[in-house]
Amino acid sequence: MGLSSALSAQNESVVFVVNPAVSNQMGQEVTYEEFKRQFLKNINLEEHQVTAAEIDEYLQLYIRFKLKIQDAVEAGQNENSAYLQELAMYREQLARNYLYDREVTADLIEEAYDRMRSEVRVSHILIACPRGANAQTEAQAKGRIEEIYQQLMRNNTAENFASLAETNSDDPGTKSAGGDLGWMTAMQVVYEFENYAYNTPEGDISPVFRTDFGYHILRVTAKRPNRGDIKVRHILIRVTAPGEEYDDAALKKIEEIRAQISSGQSSFEEMARNYSEDYNSRYNGGVMDYVNTPQYIGDPDRQKWVDQAFLLTEPGQMSPVFRTNYGYHLVQLMDIKPMASFDQMRSYLKQQVQQNARSKVSIDALVNKVKNENNFTENKTAYQAFLSVLDSSFVQGAFQIDALPKSYSKDGNRFNLLDMELFRLGNDDYTVEDFALYLQTNRRVMNMDMAAAYEAEYQAWVSQSCVENQNEHLDERSAEFRDIYQEYREGILMFNRMQELVWDKANNDSTGLAQFFNANRADYRWNDRYHVDIYYCSDAKMMKTVAKQVKKGIQADSLLRMHTKNNPLGFNYRMGYYQWSDTGMVPNPAVLNTLFANSSYSSQTGIIKMNQIGEDWVVVNLHGFLPAGPKELSECRGPVTSRYQEELEQRWMDDLESRYDVSINYDTVEALKQELNATR
């Protein structure tokens, strides 16, 4: 490997260059920023003072790494189909983290956590009207909700809201309860609804707003801090049929249960196991998982149940008997777990934000950013031209690109319709043909007029195209993405080449492994060993019994079962070949010390009662003594294979250093040392 500092001053930002061995292959240029980033990757400058020697050492390691990458490329590893498939999968996963506006996403995560710190009780009125409804349906829905809103503005009371919900709302789940959804928190309902729930003052009603379900008005009944999660034991006595006698019987039964628990005659756990009719918790002594009130949004009875539990303040405290539609309840407090910190919830919230409707806010921000940064321009002539040739098949979900006319005429000019540019992002143009292919792929029935449906699909296509454009140009637009992707790409290349030339070869090249072992046989030797069975007993009586049982040929596993019935720790054994240095392989190392300290044992075989050694009474069955001698390959294959891999890697490196020339810019290396205040 030729090492030089011959890089010119104009390349002073380059640390080193690997020159390829094959003339038609590209080399590798390692910049100052890349080398600095990799060097500092696992160094905390606040806690560690960098030395010049560390930089020099890392320079040699990074050169070796890049030589391996160059060799992998010249061997065609970067064109291997399995490699390309793995790389494509990784890029797709990595890119997802960059195909939204990261600043907006960070704000959304913080907003979600801030909202989760409180709970809001809301009621709502829904006038159903799905997105894409025809103009008549849309107008009727708007008319109905506006009329209700005006009535509420004249009389904004909880009673009037409940009355209007019961008579007008299209939400069957809350209609009969006067629109009451109960308590909610962030990430539980669609984002538009959540925004109005949190931004409407307590006691007020929201303006009319729209979601995918239709038009809403909500009323905020109350707000309170998040109380965390609660864990309780639960007893339920169901009211089995309507009627006062059934109700009285259930009440009498649960009051008797409470009385027995309160008097100490029985525990809550025992009563739950014997009498509770909550079969999810009965057989666990009434123990339930952690719960909170908002998780039961839309189910006022269950929310009431949790609210009763939160009235308890001390572990072991029991509630009064209370009633829900399920029957009569008792709960006993076990634990209250406060809401987790922001740092603890950050990853969960990020995942939820990206899967939630909030992601549209972040994606819309990215789309606007891509448009602004890439001089987004539209061609309204092309837009109108395409719209003018569409027929009813478009809204009926039967659009076919082949049915479009080939040309379009305007002001005496004739244009090739499919080639007309609809919009441009930077140097990339998006044509009518591109949009038509999108429509054909995503065709669906739309209950909308032609122009509205066309505009909706056009805007969706523009957004998708902007995101795809960002994805295609991520390497240029995001240094962070480019750096992470490069690390992974090179890491796979090096791994695959190492697998081929080192690891697989060491495991599969039996001849080469045997030759390496024979050349280094002197490094693999046994010390003096005993082949011995060691039995550890709890007392002298057991030792004598075990000695007789071993002599009779009773197997060690049978002995273990016999002598651990009463005391699981009263008996143990080890069998094998042991050197003096193997003390860590046996429970009582002093046994091996005793064997090797007394040379007379080396000429003995058979059963020996060694009496008390430390806390154990020991029986050994000596099969023989093996003096020091060479190991066979089968006895040390693991360590030999590991060393053979090291040998193969070194041979590979020697070959690489002889085949490639590396030019180092020592002035740039010195500049890094100065920047990091490296000590000499």
Image: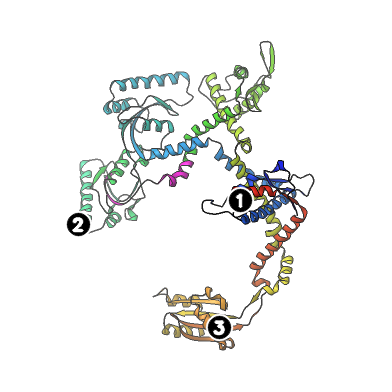
Identify which amino acid the numbered label 1 is placed on: Phe
Would you say the residues marked 1 and 2 are in contact, meaning their CB atoms lie under 8 Å apart?
Answer: no
Mark 3 and mark 1 lie on one chain; the one further toward the N terminus is 1
Residue 241 occupies quadrant: top left
Give the label on residue 263, or none.
Answer: 2
Which is more foreground, mark 1 or mark 2? 1
Crowding near pointer 2: few (<14 within 10 Å), some, many (20+)? Answer: few
Give the label on residue 620, or none.
Answer: none
- Residue identified by numbered label 1: 39
- Is residue 3 a member of the stretch shown in magenta? no
Q: Residue at x 52, y 86 (%)?
A: 607
Mark 3 and mark 2 lie on one chain; the one further toward the N terminus is 2
- The total number of labels drawn is 3
278 or 475: nearer the viewer: 475
Q: Magenta stretch: give its range.
A: 327-350
Q: Position of residue 124 (x, y in %)?
A: 35, 29
User: Does 153 appear above or below 173?
Assistant: above
- Residue identified by numbered label 3: 596
Q: Is residue 139 visible?
A: yes
Is residue 467 shown left or right of residue 361?
A: right
615 or 326: nearer the viewer: 615
